[in-house]
Image: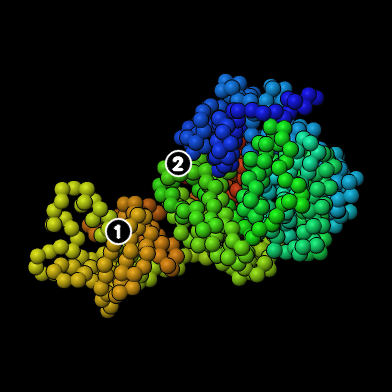
Amino acid sequence: MDRSKLFRRFRTLLIANRGEIACRVIRTARAMGLRTVAVYSEADRDAMHVALADEAVLLGPARARDSYLNVERLIEAARKTGAEAVHPGYGFLSENADFARACFEAGLVFVGPTAAMMNAMGSKSGSKALMEKAGVPLVPGYHGEAQDEATLSKAADKIGFPILVKASAGGGGRGMRIVRSAAELGPAIVSAKREALAAFGDDRMLIEKYVDNPRHIEVQVIGDSHGNLLSLFERECTLQRRHQKVIEEAPSPTLNAAQRETVCAAARKAAGAVNYVGAGTIEFVSDGKDVFFIEMNTRLQVEHPVTELITGIDLVEWQLRVAFGEALPLKQDEIRLNGHAVEARVYAENPTKNFMPSVGRISTWRLPAETGGLRIDAGYREGDSVSPYYDAMLAKMIAWAPTRDVAIERLNRGLEESDVRGIVTNIPFLSALMTHPKVRTNAIDTGFIERELAVLTQAAPAPGELELCAAVAAVINEEQQAARAQANSPWQTFGWQPVGRRQRSFAFRVGHGPEQKITLNYGSGPSTLVIGERELAFTIAAKEGGFDLTLDGVKSQVAAVIDGHELYLRTRNGRFDLHWVDPFGGESEEQVGEDKIAAPLPGTVVAVLAEEGERLEKGAPILTLEVMKMEQTLRAPFAGVLKSIKCKVGDIVQEGVELAVVEPSGE
């Protein structure tokens, strides 16, 4: 192979990805003087990464297999725009050896490892055999080629339950199941294989001993084409849900200096087994004493910013310099660890509804400024649409500080000051997670979130006196701004009146709860608000994104968003959604029968798990949808009889479509 074709200087870079990582790569590439080319699907015509790039090429329809996973169209997009190199980002084709090979054959520089390196390390089973030979510690498991259920069952019995069934070509928790008994194994294999085939086009499985109460430790490595291979310290990614990382930090608060050097040396040995070139991550699981190799990710990781913040190294810049054929600019002993960094992944999902993905238009996007150690890597803006076709991550919020405690405080402050509307996000959940006492003391493992889910997804507190007053202030503030847009007139200004006093009544409610009433008194004297027996003097001062509300001499900052009669407020007490009851009446609400099982989001029916006429217990599985590349099982809302199934496997269904009807048992 002609190495000059693998690594050489280039001026135009195509980013074969979307969302946050495409925006991230574009920013560094442009800072290095490179011309950038974005690609997009029909669903992403107006996406942020398209706007940031110098040029953009339409790949095809919304489905990833018709656009971002279409190798021929990506190569053609590079040819049409004169791109000389391709950065794959993460996800999609980033670890696809066939794509790396196709880029090489098309004369393009692939910003990443070679196809041979991907093949060696990309297969979980193949890489484990390689690591065993290199002397890297492994979790006991089966990584063989035979994939029949009998072979996998025999291997599981030999290893001993609990075990982990996982896709050999997988990542991001897809195609992965924890199995605690032999009876669970068969259904788990079928489900994991189906999910893996849909996500990766490969349903091969491996089996590992499941380490109870484990910690997830990973080491960032990078190599160049001159034989230099470095480790850039480790990250702790223990806070996970369904094998998907939620919070990442660097360095690990679990390891001491000696353990850090041991795991970093093991990572360099693992990458050195294939003479690795490019950025990659060696992942380990720890039982509290020892670490065991899990896999290597032959790409940039979602959580790479925490490593960047503690080392001062731009990993995308180093990736591009390696692709230029340059030697790494530092030696191992020149890399310094400085401070602590923590990252939170902001997703369009509803934690109170089993983290169901949320789709729609982002009507409000307010995140704090990137100052004081706060960094935000975003892939969306106000007005952008979140579609059901791709991963639901919107942005990453990362905080750096000299110590872990201060980094966590900075991150939580950033989360608390974020307001995203139009869709549901996991921001309140992330804030609850970062303030949990056990997270602060690092008393966690990979099962922590699942165990603490009830605490982390508690309902928002009921609005109090401050929030009800803020709701009135929000309405008044909105009316004042509308009045200012019209001809100036003292009669259009709230509170101005030559003589006398007037009253105005308001009523608000949360969900289907009772109305809460509040009276505004205004006119020739100070304005007041009356709640029950209390009368409070108040003033408001408008500011961007909300207003300052002063109640009885105490000023509070309030963030507010009004959409018709729906109010969103953020006060010192948290976030609140209130409904302003129409003072002229006429409101009505449609009642939806709970016996009907409807699609919560657009998706594909991948399994029907019950039959018409079957008696079901509450929570019994009825059917499975694939939504945003993840499987969602819809279950019986109560005990009863499955009256009808209104879909079949393979159906593509839209949000709200009725899929099944359960008739209560009447007991």
Location of residue 379 in the rendering, given as x and y in whole percent from the top left corner:
52, 43
Which amino acid lies under the numbered mark 1 shown in the image of this protein? Answer: Ala
Residue at the limit of the structure toward the left, as seen here: 499
Give the labeled residue for mark 2: 384
Closer-to-camera residue (194/660): 194
The answer to whether residue 229 is seen in the rendering is yes
Front of the two marks 2 and 1: 1
Which amino acid lies under the numbered mark 2 shown in the image of this protein? Answer: Asp
Location of residue 526 in the rendering, given as x and y in whole percent from the top left corner:
19, 71
> Residue 99 is drawn in which quadrant?
top right
Determine the secondary structure under disc 1: strand
The mark found on residue 542 in the picture is 1
**Picture layout, residue 378 above or below residue 32:** below
Is 450 placed left or right of 214 in the picture? left
Closer-to-camera residue (527/449): 527
Comes first in the chain, label 2 or label 1? 2
At a point 31% along the width and 69% down the height, the residue shown is 550
Determine the secondary structure under disc 2: loop
The answer to whether residue 344 is seen in the rendering is no
Closer-to-camera residue (161/124): 124
Q: Quadrant of the C terminus?
A: bottom right
At a point 20% along the width and 52% down the height, the residue shown is 483
Closer-to-camera residue (331/311): 331
